[in-house]
Image (spheres, rainbow, N blue to C red):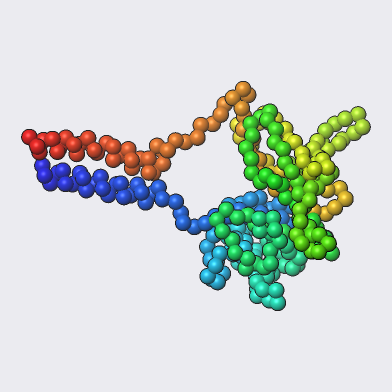
Amino acid sequence: MKHTLTMILTICLLLSLLAIGVGAKSEEPTVTVTVIKQGSVVAALETVNLTDADGDGALTVCDALYAVHEKLYEGGAKAGFGYYTGEYGLSMSKLWGDESGMFGYYLNNASCMSLADPVKDGDSITAFIYQSQDWSDVYTYFDVTEASVSTGEEITLTLMAAGYDENWNPISYPVEGAVITLNGNPVYAQSTSGSTPMWETDENGQVTISINTLNAAVESYVIGARCPDTVIVPPVCKLTVSVSEATGPVLEEPGEQNSCSGVIGAGLVALLPLACLCMKRKEK
């Protein structure tokens, strides 16, 4: 009986250590990366794990862009991404297969000095290929990058542009008159005067969007924008629309008991009464 009790307690200890290992979070930091190829979003706030891909001993914008190409670009980073060290430091030679050299990249909506700019967990990187031959594309962004709403609800976004003042200090300002797009396409409302944009930003750069969907229980949209008189780097907001209780079923999220750590925990609970029973018999 003593050997049986020892074996059960040993199994409990091993399972508890395994549960801790399974439940532990990865130490690799994660960032979101957006890639825009001449006005078209090819990667929208894609989450990637950061590793020191270029071997410089630091986690940088270069590593984030390398990771998103490895994840999404056909042929990986070797085929779609390139970098070199030049007069202005670590620079990009290829982005999403394009080798024009007309690239821009921002970290948390601020212009980068080089690909060697350090990044940390939770940062957001946007890289793009200029549309204008004179490099005049205006970088824009929404104040909200990800949101979830139910059918019939509204979301208000503010569209901002990045620029410089008369002393070349970086500034941001609201964008008025931008037409809102869903998945890259503008949405129009029919009226007696013809088709007009469904949503446009006001003088404060704000727009309120109401989306009703009768399709699947959950749909995802990439909200963007276009300006009629200015070439912009389009902003990105990932919107998840779910059916409300009044209009349809809500998908239940899986509970913790379905996870590996939950199964192991249940096994521990099942074994403990047996261990206690053995201890009582030993006492007798």
* Residue 183 seen from this side: no
Residue placed at 91% from the left, 29% from the top?
192
* Residue 60 horizontal side relative to residue 11, left or right: right
Q: How many marks?
A: 0
Could you say where residue 83 lies in the image, as x and y percent from the top left?
A: 65, 70
Residue closest to the far bottom: 87
Which of 22/78 is in front? 22
Residue closest to the far left: 284
* Residue 128 seen from this side: yes
* Residue 168 horizontal side relative to residue 78, left or right: right
Which of 230/216 is in front? 230
Residue placed at 87% from the left, 35% from the top?
195
Tell me where residue 133 sits by quadrant.
Answer: bottom right
Q: Does residue 227 sit above or below 54 in this rendering?
A: above
Q: Does residue 191 sit above or below 167 in this rendering?
A: above
**Quadrant occupied by the N terminus:** top left
